[in-house]
């Protein structure tokens, strides 16, 4: 994996700075297409964010803070 | 920055000669010459023996593409000697041949080919099974690619360098240089990576110097926005436009917003009987050997072609002083009265020769797609030049997601990918004018995509369109009809046309399965020589067109890379030191790796250290514990939801043991937490787990939007544990705090100065004695430690290491998460069920633990003793029942204090009751064990509450 | 039971204390910290910092972090400039050598030029701001000289070019595989970079810096550092 994730605080960063935290609860699960996932910026601001990632291409379409996620 | 290219300037400098050894003979080379060129000049013609049949193989591509010149150089296997510069003193050895390249006894396999059909290893050797070791040994000996020196040891490891640029151009030929110059002129930051030592690409060997190229190269070198790096090989284009490259044994990771791939083209081979004989070259390989390395490939040449390339090549060869006997062209057409014989409408049938080519037999095509019988003729020569036509060297483009389609006789990019473009031969453009125009356009477009202004983009697009339309090209047929069974397609793996026919007949009729079954394209060249030929054969045999047949997937690495280079990032392995590290080192610590931490396992006498703790006092550095502070109105709420036990009822100034589970109810971490005030808590986490616990708390703080700050103070605070019956008296010497049992009881928390250092003190009993865990700012740890050591000298205080601590805690039956538990262990099974507060409405693991409680545990973690024997089963030993494994030992030690072997083990729940007996398999013998009540030591806990 | 006063006032040590001693540093106590004054000769160290590459262990300089939702308000009212308005911005406080680094909307980190007095200056914080002395949490190195730029790409995958990490900017990122804060102090003078890493990897990162410097890095002691920051040649002492 070598794609970029845009951290809402730190800007675009190499994915290796982040830890994957799984799909958000309530997601459809393991389907080809965009997936809502939790990512932790462990080597940056050390906050959790939500990334919408197209799992077919590893393109991150959108990111926002986990706090901003509507429960 | 390198010098501008001077096409055809002799790079090999005969004035500066050097000598290396080839086997046992010295070989001299000119500076700048490749190993293979020097060997060729010294008369070597056989450079390797083929993978399966041990056929002699000579130079073919002289471009580092094919497998023919792989040799062992200074112990490194599989070096592509045709592009590896010769260096003085090198030791070069051939591979896969015995006793020598010239006479290889395994050549006999060449006559056994009917016993070695395609996929033979799937069809033979698997029965009888007991013979497999013999088969394996034999096969490995026969089919080899060099020898790895397994005793070489670890090199220091390659370095890694991360580069960033707006536009990265790969390949410094005419298209690449023009693309880089155009992007830089538009204002973009440009990085140009070239594999060879100089810019120029194919102009260095096959063309006349061109003004357009010279002008671009000149501009590039004077442009401060452009950086040119030669001798840099790009091996992969990964997602996010990350390029992997190697330069001088260093890994480069280049992140570019725009990538322009200008990696050039490749001459294709022809398929005919014995087409692998030494002396048969790809046409441009002969030019490279002559013009880059100053070595003549032969004296009399036959050129085999399927288009105008052959005639161009023939005149180049004539210019080099090589006599061209004939140009054999598949296409019908009139001879044009050249200096050589022209055989239009002819195809090669077979090459003649044993260890080198002596000539080639050709025949005219008949009208029906076959060969006209009885009209074949023999052309004597010592050099056969294959020039059926060029194809794109497009591996990086394919990796970048660009797809190629076969249209109007050529492979062309069919789908645009944002941020990735190709230009020149790599994109299927072979016309000298068109490739430069396209290079300029792609470079300018890359800059424009980044927001730079390119004034004449529209005009240049029109020019390129016109040039493109003029650059037509016929379809090439590289597999003409003809007989013989040594029509090699894949040289790496010795796969012939016949093998592919048989594989397709057996049902492997898609290119991907055909590749996997026949191994075509699976060798060192990874399909660079054979890939398209395999596609064409597959298309012909299955009656599909080329686009429906397709090509196999291109994956990194596009060129061979040493594993040590790929592992360069692993060079940075963080090592964590506690502030007392060098104190321990000076005291003779035996080190233990605990995650990234270094911890003293002991100071040489773990038994004595443990005894000191039980009888007097001991001091251990526990700075590796995770330390996390929570502050805010919702601090208690966060803990309630994350931990199994309750925290809200904890009073300020008190501490409590706690553990947490993940969402599956599996134990994740444990530690002690203290309440500092109404909204403030201080937690410890297990060694090595601080970051994970912090991330976990942050995750749930954010998810539930709780008003609490979580601060990781692991690195900022050191911690030591002062334990033993005389710990109180030692501590009292260095603090004004009232440390009496009533003022500072068990599981209490205090903040006070110790030896003048502001500290946090927790009265705990991990090792089963009166004990104080003292946390202080890391910068003062040394001072605190020394003050405690001095204060404890009279009492017999000794520093102790992890080994003594493990024994002491085992005597107390304390579980270490991660050692005694694994990824399936729940608190209910691990004897921590007393901790779980099911009356809390919400905490992690509640639902799975409720289910488990209802179902009952299947396995339990229990304490055990080995009666009457001092034998200690190794940790990880199996618990067996009727000879079958049913559990395992997680901790075991001989306890001098109890004078018996004790331990913790996972056993079936039916054996969990104290007194129950089970067996431990230990070096083939079953050791009887008895479940013991925990703790083993001081069951009433009087000592730690003292 | 008797209690005794501590035998001597505590002395603070940086994580490189042992390393400095083993590499010939002249150590002395300054503001309660054992720090290296010089390794060879202050003037030579300063010259190297100006023209090549020099590394100083400044872990002893005070670091204070402000955390919480009140941070934006604090930045708006207490800081004069606008540089720290956004994450990634660094502002030099008017009084003295303190840098304010905006790491996150709710996280401001002060890097002081001394080892005393900063905490006192930062009193009277608004609601919703918690103050932590993180001096010991972060080992801190100060790199000087034009050759910083050639060593950084060997240690971090972050784009540290002037567009991405300009003078007056900061970024938290991976550095030799550990978490680090990189700060380019604003203002004129010798090009410099401050690197803050967890205390426990201080020695590890220091050695990685020297390795990436390929033998070109000079060690810079406190005497040279002071001269450099004053702008003289380091011989006045």
Image (tube, coloured by chain):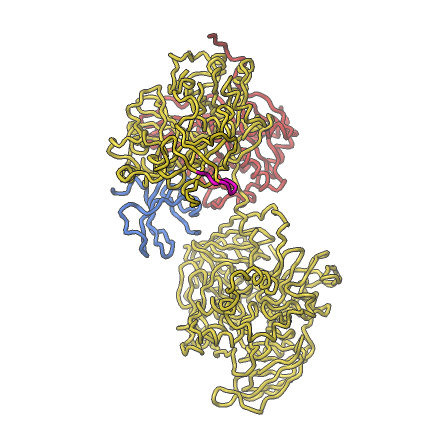
Q: Toward the viewer: B730 or B437? A: B730
Residue A33 sits in quarter: bottom left
Indicate left or right for B23 with B788 as reference. Answer: right
When asked about the image quadrant of residue B61, the answer is bottom right
Residue placed furthest toward the bottom: B374
Vertically, is B39 above or below C79?
below
Q: Is residue B867 above or below residue B488?
A: above
Answer with left or right where residue B614 lies relative to residue A47. Answer: right
* B136 over B758 or under it: above or below: below
Of the pair B822 and B380, the residue shown nearer to us: B822
Q: Position of residue A71 (x, y in %)?
A: 25, 42
Instruction: Tell me, by letter, which chain the rendering colours blue.
Output: A
Residue C42 visible (yes or no):
no
Q: Main secondary structure of the magenta part?
A: strand
Q: Is residue B575 visible?
A: yes
Location of residue B22 with respect to B669 vertically, above or below: below
Tell me residue C53's x, y (percent). 59, 38
Q: Which of B304 and C39 is in front in this view?
A: B304
Image quarter in which the N terminus of chain B is found: bottom right
Quadrant in which the C terminus of chain B appears: top left
The yellow-tinted chain is B
- Residue B190 image position (x, y, % from top left): 50, 55
Picture residue at 70% right of the left edge, 57% below the top = B90
Does the magenta-highlighted stretch encompass residue B429?
A: no
Say which colour chain C has.
Answer: red
The region drawn magenta spans B919-925
Q: In this view, does C184 lie to the left or right of B933?
A: right
Query: x, y percentage for residue B575?
Result: 53, 36
Q: Residue at x 47, y 46 (%)?
A: C159
């Amino acid at each position: 994996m070598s794609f970029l994730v845009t951290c809402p605080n730190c800007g675009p960063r190499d994915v290796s700075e982040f830890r994957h935290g799984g799909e958000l609860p309530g997601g459809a699960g393991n389907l080809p297409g965009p997936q809502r996932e939790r990512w932790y910026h462990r080597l940056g601001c050390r906050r959790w964010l939500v990334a919408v990632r197209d799992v077919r291409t590893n393109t991150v379409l959108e990111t926002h803070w986990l706090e901003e996620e509507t429960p | 920055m390198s010098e501008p290219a001077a096409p055809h300037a002799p790079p090999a400098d005969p004035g500066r000669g050097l000598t290396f050894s080839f086997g046992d003979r010295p070989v001299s080379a000119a500076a700048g010459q490749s190993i293979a060129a020097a060997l060729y000049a010294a008369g070597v013609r056989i450079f390797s023996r083929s993978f399966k049949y041990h056929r002699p193989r000579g130079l073919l591509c002289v471009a580092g593409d094919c497998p023919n010149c792989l040799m062992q150089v200074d112990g490194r296997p599989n070096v592509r000697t045709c592009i590896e510069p010769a260096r003085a003193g090198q030791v070069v050895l051939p591979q896969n041949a015995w006793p020598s390249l010239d006479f290889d006894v395994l050549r006999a396999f060449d006559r056994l080919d009917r016993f070695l059909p395609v996929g033979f290893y799937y069809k033979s050797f698997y029965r009888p099974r007991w013979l497999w070791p013999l088969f394996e040994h034999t096969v490995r000996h026969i089919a080899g690619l060099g020898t790895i020196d397994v005793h070489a040891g670890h090199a220091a490891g390659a370095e890694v360098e991360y580069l960033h640029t707006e536009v990265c151009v790969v390949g410094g030929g005419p298209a690449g240089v023009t693309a880089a110059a155009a992007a830089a002129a538009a204002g973009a930051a440009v990085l140009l990576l070239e594999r060879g030592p100089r810019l120029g690409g194919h102009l260095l060997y096959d063309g006349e110097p061109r003004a357009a190229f010279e002008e671009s190269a000149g501009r590039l070198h004077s442009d401060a926005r452009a950086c040119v790096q030669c001798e840099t090989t790009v091996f992969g284009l990964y997602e996010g436009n990350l390029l992997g490259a190697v330069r001088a044994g260093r890994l480069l990771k280049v992140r570019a917003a725009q990538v322009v791939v200008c990696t050039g083209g490749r001459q294709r081979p022809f398929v005919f009987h014995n087409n692998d004989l030494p002396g048969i070259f790809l046409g441009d390989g002969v030019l490279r050997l002559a013009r880059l390395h100053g070595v003549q490939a032969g004296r009399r040449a036959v050129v085999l072609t399927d288009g105008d390339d052959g005639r161009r090549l023939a005149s180049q060869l004539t210019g080099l002083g090589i006599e061209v006997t004939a140009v054999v062209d598949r296409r019908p057409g009139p001879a044009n009265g050249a200096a050589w014989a022209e055989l239009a409408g002819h195809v090669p049938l077979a090459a003649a020769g044993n260890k080198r080519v002596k000539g080639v037999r050709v025949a005219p095509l008949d009208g029906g797609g076959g060969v006209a019988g009885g009209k074949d003729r023999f052309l004597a020569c010592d050099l056969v030049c294959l020039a059926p036509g060029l194809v794109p060297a497009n591996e990086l483009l394919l990796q970048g997601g660009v797809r190629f389609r076969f249209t109007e006789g050529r492979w062309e990019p069919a789908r645009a990918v944002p941020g990735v473009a190709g230009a020149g031969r790599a994109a299927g453009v072979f016309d000298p004018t068109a490739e430069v125009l396209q290079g300029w356009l792609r470079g300018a477009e890359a800059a424009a995509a980044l927001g730079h202004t390119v004034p004449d983009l529209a005009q240049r697009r029109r020019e390129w369109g016109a040039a493109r339309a003029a650059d037509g090209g016929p379809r090439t047929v590289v597999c003409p009809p003809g007989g013989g069974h040594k029509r090699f397609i894949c040289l790496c793996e010795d796969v012939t046309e016949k093998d592919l026919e048989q594989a397709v007949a057996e049902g492997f009729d898609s290119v991907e399965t055909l590749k996997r079954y026949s191994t075509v394209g699976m060798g060192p060249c990874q399909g660079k020589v054979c890939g398209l030929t395999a596609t064409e054969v597959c298309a012909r045999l299955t009656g599909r067109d080329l686009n429906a047949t397709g090509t196999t997937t291109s994956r990194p690495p596009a060129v061979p890379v040493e594993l040590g280079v790929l592992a360069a990032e692993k060079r940075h392995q963080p090592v964590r030191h506690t502030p007392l590290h060098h104190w321990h080192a000076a005291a003779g610590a035996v080190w233990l790796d605990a995650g990234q931490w270094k911890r003293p396992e002991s100071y040489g006498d773990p038994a004595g250290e443990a005894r000191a703790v039980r009888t007097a006092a001991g001091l251990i550095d526990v700075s590796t514990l995770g330390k996390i502070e929570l502050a805010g109105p919702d601090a208690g709420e966060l803990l309630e939801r994350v931990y199994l036990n309750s925290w809200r009822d904890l009073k300020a100034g008190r501490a409590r043991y706690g553990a947490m589970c993940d969402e599956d109810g599996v134990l994740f971490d444990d530690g002690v937490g203290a309440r500092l005030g109404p909204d403030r808590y201080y937690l410890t986490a297990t060694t090595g787990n601080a970051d994970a616990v912090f991330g976990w708390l942050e995750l749930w703080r954010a998810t539930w939007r709780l008003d609490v700050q979580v601060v990781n103070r692991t690195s900022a605070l050191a911690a030591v544990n002062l334990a033993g019956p005389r710990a109180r008296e030692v501590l009292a010497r260095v603090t004004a705090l009232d440390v009496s049992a009533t003022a500072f009881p068990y599981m209490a928390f205090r903040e006070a100065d110790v030896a003048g250092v502001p500290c946090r003190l927790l009265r705990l009993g991990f090792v089963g004695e009166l004990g104080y865990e003292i946390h202080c700012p890391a910068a003062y740890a040394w001072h605190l430690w020394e003050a405690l050591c001095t204060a404890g000298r009279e009492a017999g205080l000794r520093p102790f290491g992890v080994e003594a601590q493990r024994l002491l805690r085992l005597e107390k039956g304390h579980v270490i998460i991660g050692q005694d538990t694994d990824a399936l262990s729940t608190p209910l099974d691990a004897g921590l069920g007393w901790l779980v507060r099911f009356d809390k409405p919400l905490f992690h693991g509640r639902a799975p633990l409720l289910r488990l409680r209802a179902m009952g545990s299947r396995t339990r973690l229990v304490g055990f003793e080995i009666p009457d024997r001092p034998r200690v089963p190794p940790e990880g030993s199996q618990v067996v029942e009727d000879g079958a494994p049913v559990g395992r030992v997680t901790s075991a030690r001989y306890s001098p204090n109890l004078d018996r072997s004790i331990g913790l083990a996972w056993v079936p729940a039916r054996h969990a009751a104290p007194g129950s007996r089970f067996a431990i398999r230990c070096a083939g013998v079953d050791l009887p064990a008895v479940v013991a009540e925990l703790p083993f030591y001081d069951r009433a806990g009087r000592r730690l509450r003292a | 039971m008797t209690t005794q006063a501590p035998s001597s006032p505590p002395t603070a040590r940086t994580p490189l204390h042992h390393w400095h001693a083993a590499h010939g540093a002249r150590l002395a106590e300054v503001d309660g910290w054992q720090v290296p004054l010089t390794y060879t000769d202050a003037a030579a160290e300063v010259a190297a910092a100006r023209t090549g590459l020099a590394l100083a262990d400044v872990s002893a300089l005070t670091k204070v972090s402000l955390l919480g939702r009140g941070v934006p308000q604090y930045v708006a009212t207490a800081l004069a400039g606008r540089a720290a308005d956004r994450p990634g911005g660094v502002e030099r406080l008017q009084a003295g050598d303190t840098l304010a680094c905006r790491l996150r909307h709710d996280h401001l980190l002060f890097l002081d030029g001394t080892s005393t007095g900063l905490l006192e200056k930062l009193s009277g914080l608004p609601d919703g701001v918690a103050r932590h002395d993180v001096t010991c949490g972060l080992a801190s190195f100060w790199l000087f000289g034009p050759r910083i730029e050639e060593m950084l790409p060997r240690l971090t995958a972050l784009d540290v070019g002037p567009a991405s990490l300009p003078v007056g900017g900061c970024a938290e990122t991976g550095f030799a595989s550990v978490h680090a804060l990189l700060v380019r102090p604003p203002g004129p003078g010798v090009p410099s970079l401050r690197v803050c890493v967890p205390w426990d990897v201080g020695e590890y990162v220091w050695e990685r810096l020297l390795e990436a410097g390929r033998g070109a890095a000079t060690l810079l002691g406190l005497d040279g550092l002071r001269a450099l920051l004053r702008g003289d040649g380091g011989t006045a002492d």
